[in-house]
Image: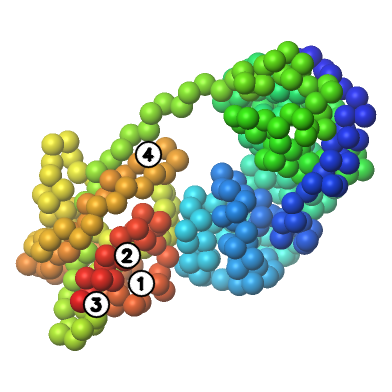
Amino acid sequence: MTHVLSQAAVSSLGRWFARHARDLPWRRRRDLYAVWISEVMLQQTRVETVIPYYRDFLRRFPTLKRLASASLQDMLKAWEGLGYYSRARNLWQAARLVQTEFRGRIPADFSEFRSLPGVGEYIAAAVLSIGRGLALPVVDGNVLRVVCRWQGIATDIRLAAAKKNVRQFLQGIIPADSPGRFNEAMMELGALVCLPRVPLCGQCPLRRCCFALRHGKTGLLPVKSRKRPVPEYHVALAVITRESGEKGGGRIFIQQRPELGHLGGLWEFPGGKCRPGEKPEAAVGRECREELGVEIAALGRLAEVRHAYSHFKVHLHVFICRLRRGRIRTDRPHAWVRIDELQQYPFPGANHKFFPQLKEYFNT
């Protein structure tokens, strides 16, 4: 690694941050709990998306004690739509552990904090540097991009070696008196100036010592290998109805996903992946037989929606159905709910995409 390092560059970064830092709600409250909430929400999620969730979450759960005493369902409902629900489950479990194992005090020791569910290297460094002033460098996507350009690091940033090199470099320059502010400045620089495609080099406080700018390589750094194509699955869902005879009074069968695993703890409609060569109409009937032990009749197709997760995509085929034979048998928590009661349950974002058609069907 070529070290182009000077105290002047770090000082220049600090002055730039003082002038250009965005007024974000989590920068107004610096206790460990609030910082922790913001950093968990900000992982793989845009700032603009997080702001309303962060404000609402702290209104519902203003302290760690309140979060630890809440039910997982209440917590997931507050998180609904933010995605990456394993983050929410881990945060809830970690809050409960802090209450029981650390007497309600979030540990300020790196190893102890790192031992909590969902707390990785990035979360631990961000929370403890910002909330406790520990000299721990933060390495996220923005910081990787800034440092690779600044220092001319050509290692593929998808590799652990790149993160290790960047972290070692930052450990040597992070100011002991203001590590949290330094970390925020680095992340902010990547978010506002050192952009992926068209960096605003003329506005960068590091431009005088930037390897990539000096050598005309801003378009080549950082090196990032292509992602493998993500698979797309066709999934058939059954909205099983039980009519009540009054307008808008029909009930729908829903069930809760197991707490462990993808979208754990959220509610859903029965169904599953189509097998190779299997039509969705056949798959929805098969899935209901396998999951619930019933025969259903598909009354019609309600909607088709597509949704992308981090490692795969789904193409949902949603059918309005009724029970034809048998009685539902399932070990999962389940309920028959009215259409206006769906809002009481946390559902995956993909399901919300066909809720408008569902409401229209029941209210016409």
Q: Residue 310 location in percent, x, y?
A: 45, 40
Left/right placement of residue 350 relative to residue 166 reads left
Q: Nearer the viewer, mark 4 or mark 2?
A: 2
- The reply to whether callout 4 and callout 3 are in contact (CB within 8 Å) is no
The dot on residue 363 is: 3
How crowded is the residue under tag 2: few (<14 C-alpha within 10 Å), some, or many (20+)?
Answer: some
Residue at which label 4 appears? 312
Left/right placement of residue 332 relative to residue 15 reads left
| Residue 98 can be seen in this image | yes
Identify the residue at the far left of this view.
Answer: 325
Q: Amino acid at mark 3?
A: Asn
Which of the two discs, 4 and 3, labels the residue nearer the N terminus?
4
The alpha-carbon separation of the residues under discs 2 and 1 comes to 9 Å
The dot on residue 342 is: 1
Q: Amino acid at mark 1?
A: Leu
Q: Who's the residue at 36% across and 47% down the image?
A: 307
